[in-house]
Amino acid sequence: MPANITLQELPTNCNVIDIRPVCDFATGHLQNAINIPYEILMTYPESYLKRDEVYYLICAHGSLSHRAAAILQAYGYNVASVKNGYGLRCYCW
């Protein structure tokens, strides 16, 4: 089970990956976050993640980042999910 932390518990200067679609990321995101949409990250995790670093995944409301963290953790990556995400309902089609 991946770790869940709140936005307030997020360490400063950490690896934050925003897994929302590009159009949602463009509307606002954490200053130090990089955008790797869920589908891309889950298809090519080895292209973006190192097994010896810690990553914090964030999405709109937390469920997708939790699911991604669980899968990536099973692959051997050190990841945590930001609980409740940004607390947003994002719709991007």
Image (cartoon, helix red, strand yellow):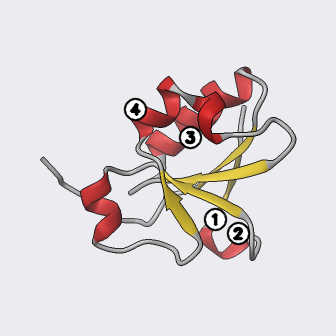
Q: Where does label 1 land, which residue?
A: 6
Could you say which is closer to the camera, residue 55 or residue 86? 55
Q: Amino acid at mark 2?
A: Leu
Q: Secondary structure at mark 1?
A: loop
* Circle 2/circle 1 CB separation < 8 Å: yes
Q: How far, Cα to Cα, is label 3 from label 1?
A: 12 Å
Q: Where does label 4 land, which residue?
A: 39
Q: How far, Cα to Cα, is label 2 from label 1?
A: 6 Å
* Circle 3/circle 1 CB separation < 8 Å: no
Residue drawn at the location 31% of the way across and 50% of the way down: 21
Q: How far, Cα to Cα, is label 4 from label 3?
A: 14 Å
Q: Where does label 2 land, which residue?
A: 10
* Residue 11 occupies quadrant: bottom right
Give the image location of residue 7, x and y in percent. Answer: 61, 70
User: Is residue 38 at all visible to an observer of this figure?
Assistant: yes
Q: Amino acid at mark 1?
A: Thr
Q: Where does label 3 land, which residue?
A: 66
- Is 89 displayed left or right of 17 in the figure? left
